[in-house]
Image (cartoon, rainbow, N blue to C red):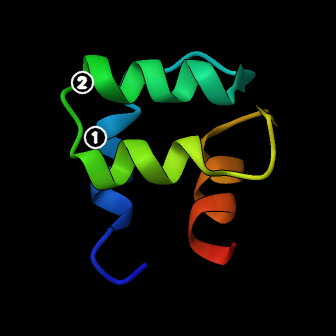
Amino acid sequence: MADLSPIDLQKALNGMDYPADKKSLVDCARKNKADDKVVSRLGGLKENSFDGPNEVQKAVFNG
């Protein structure tokens, strides 16, 4: 998704504790007042569990 940057994702997940599930990622992004496109992208991930921010970034940007 071209309109979503890694920096947007990092800001949205600031303070996230890992491992984390998809719901926790979405909740954290909402708490950090992330843009709807970020929240929607996190909510639509195929995976449900992430060991760290690198895994989330790979899932978001590499499908």
Left or right, residue 14 beside residue 32: right
Q: What amino acid type should be assigned to the residue bearing mark 2?
A: Asn
Mark 1 or 2: in front is: 2
Q: Are marks 1 and 2 in contact (CB under 8 Å)?
A: yes
Q: Position of residue 62 (x, y in %)?
A: 67, 76
Q: Position of residue 5 (x, y in %)?
A: 32, 68
SS for callout 1 = helix
Q: What amino acid type should be assigned to the residue bearing mark 1?
A: Lys
Of labels 1 and 2, earlier in sequence is 1
Residue at image position (63%, 48%) is: 56
Residue situated in front as seen by the camera: 46 or 20? 46
Query: Split into 4 quadrants, where in the image is the C terminus?
Result: bottom right
SS for callout 2 = loop
- Is disc 2 surrounded by few (<14), some (14 to 19) or many (20+) residues within 10 Å? some
Residue, disc 2: 32
The image quadrant that residue 31 belongs to is top left
Query: Split into 4 quadrants, where in the image is the N terminus?
Result: bottom left
36 vs 49: above or below: below
Q: Position of residue 45 (x, y in %)?
A: 67, 51
